[in-house]
């Protein structure tokens, strides 16, 4: 035990007294002098390595703009490679939460890893801002007060495409995706509107994630009588599928369509002319002409050697933007987690994709638009040109039990949209309720 002299006893006692006099807020702020730790669980190797890199770069762009200091505290990013393996992703999540004691977590890319991380995050009350993985369940029966998503639910880019493909491309379609949760979610959302619009599924296949030889699947497609294909592949899977589809000679006779990830700028340079004419649905294209996007594309290219930003970089940018705004709102105090959740819920800003906001019912981003895009040769190279769009695409959130937004504070006499005047219980609140509600009982 340390020897306590009269002098250091008095020093300690007066510090304690000063702490008590300052009150809990000041003492807490004092204890928060260190950096804000942001843990990243992302693939920096494997099929989706390019996605992990783009998300990280999008975040770095925003933090660099803030000189890596927000709310009086340094920003420290702790990057962990999940190697695209759920057990590794879960182990890295535990390390970031239990050993590094991160303030906020972000990632992953892979839906299976997100599902594996979910309970650890929820039970430890760690704030997770999902910056890619689209597992629908996270906006539905497995939603959590502590989990937000800035990217998309797997449903969002695909559900509008079912009807669009049936109407504008073909009613005889073969569908394909990697054999794991995201593949099933994404094609499920496509079917949801394709079949009611009169579409017929002439075949369906699920190669393994990381397949390198699609020949057996392309043979099946050729023999199926399909007039179009709808596919979800991403990262190196998207490069291999699109190139082999062209080399197999299917491109001219069977129109290739899919979820936007199939032809994002992370894979377009490797796909080259094989990608020309492919039609996909996505919330972003670097060709959007809003001022935030124009600045984003310019600054991203300047910082990362001329690289064209993709949807993943936009997701990283929006994740960092949400974090920066929340930290400013709480003056850098990350200890009051419910308060941090409250301010994150209210995030609203101009993102490169349009006006960014979360759905309070699910904590999932509302997509301002899903763009239907065609790969064309445009000034500056091959890119996704928007040809149509669907507004305000919101995940249905079925089964999510997050608290609803707070009720209207006062009786206004007006009913909310969707309610008739006599039925809306929120019409009778506050002092008006004391009179009217008593009379109604
Ligand atoms: C996912 O696993 O949720 C996932 C992966 C890659 C994408 C989109 C979704 O491009």
Image (tube, helix red, strand yellow):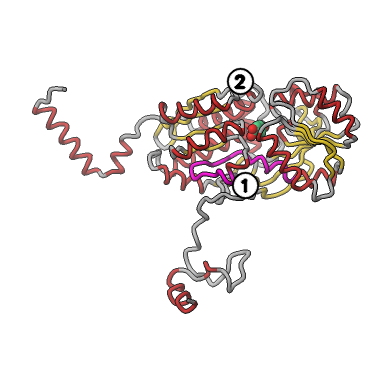
Q: Camera-side residue: 203 or 2?
A: 203
Q: Secondary structure at mark 1?
A: loop
Q: Is residue 234 above or below residue 403?
A: above
Residue 87, above or below 258: above
Give the residue at the far bottom of this rendering: 439
Residue at (37, 30) in percent of width and height: 34
Task: Give residue 150's quadrant in the image.
Answer: top right
Q: Could you tell me which quadrant the N terminus lies in?
A: top left
Which residue corresponds to the image point at 57% horizontal and 34% vertical from the top-left?
114
* Extreme residue in the left direction: 6
Determine if the magenta segment contains residue 407.
no
Q: Which residue is mark 2?
A: 45
Foreground: disc 1 or disc 2: 2
Label 1 CB-ligand 1 distance < 8 A: no
Question: Residue tagged by mark 1?
Answer: 366
Magenta stretch, residue numbers:
139-160
In front: 324, or 205? 205
């Amino acid at each position: 035990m340390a020897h306590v002299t009269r002098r250091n006893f008095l020093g300690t006692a007066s510090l304690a007294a000063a702490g008590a006099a300052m009150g809990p807020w000041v003492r807490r702020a004092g204890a928060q002098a260190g950096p804000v730790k942001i843990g990243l669980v992302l693939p920096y190797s494997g099929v989706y390595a390019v996605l992990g890199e783009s998300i990280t770069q999008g975040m770095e762009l925003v933090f660099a703009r803030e000189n890596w200091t927000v709310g009086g505290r340094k920003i420290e990013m702790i990057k962990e490679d999940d190697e695209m393996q759920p057990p590794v992703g879960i182990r890295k999540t535990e390390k970031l939460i239990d050993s590094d004691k991160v303030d906020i977590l972000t990632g992953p890319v892979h839906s299976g890893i997100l599902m594996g991380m979910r309970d650890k995050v929820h039970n430890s009350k760690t704030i997770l801002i999902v910056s890619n993985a689209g597992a629908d369940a996270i906006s539905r029966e497995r939603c959590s007060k502590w989990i937000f998503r800035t990217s998309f639910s797997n449903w969002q880019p695909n559900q509008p495409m079912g009807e669009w493909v049936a109407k504008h491309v073909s009613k005889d379609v073969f569908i394909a995706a990697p054999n794991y949760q995201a593949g099933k979610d994404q094609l499920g959302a496509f079917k949801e509107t394709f079949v009611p619009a009169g579409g017929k599924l002439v075949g369906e296949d699920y190669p393994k994630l990381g397949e390198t030889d699609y020949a057996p699947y392309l043979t099946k497609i050729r023999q199926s009588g399909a007039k179009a294909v709808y596919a979800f592949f991403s990262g190196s899977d998207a490069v291999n599928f699109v190139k082999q589809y062209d080399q197999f000679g299917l491109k001219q006779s069977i129109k290739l369509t899919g979820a936007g990830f199939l032809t994002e700028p992370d894979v377009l340079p490797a796909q080259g002319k094989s990608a020309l004419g492919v039609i996909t649905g996505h919330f972003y294209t670097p060709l959007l002409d809003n001022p935030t996007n124009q600045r984003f594309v310019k600054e991203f290219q300047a910082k990362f050697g001329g690289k064209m930003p993709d949807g993943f970089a936009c997701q990283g940018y929006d994740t960092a933007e949400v974090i920066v705004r929340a930290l400013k709102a709480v003056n850098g105090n990350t200890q009051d987690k419910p308060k941090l959740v409250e301010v994150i819920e209210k995030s609203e800003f101009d993102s490169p994709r349009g006006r960014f906001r979360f759905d309070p019912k699910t904590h999932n981003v509302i997509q301002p638009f899903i763009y239907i895009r065609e790969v064309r040769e445009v000034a500056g190279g091959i890119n996704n040109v928007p040809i149509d769009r669907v507004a305000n695409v919101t995940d249905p959130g079925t089964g999510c039990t997050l608290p609803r937004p707070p009720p209207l504070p006062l009786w206004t006499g007006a009913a909310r949209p969707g309610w008739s005047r006599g039925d809306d219980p929120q019409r009778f609140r506050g002092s008006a309720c004391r009179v009217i509600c008593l009379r109604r009982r």
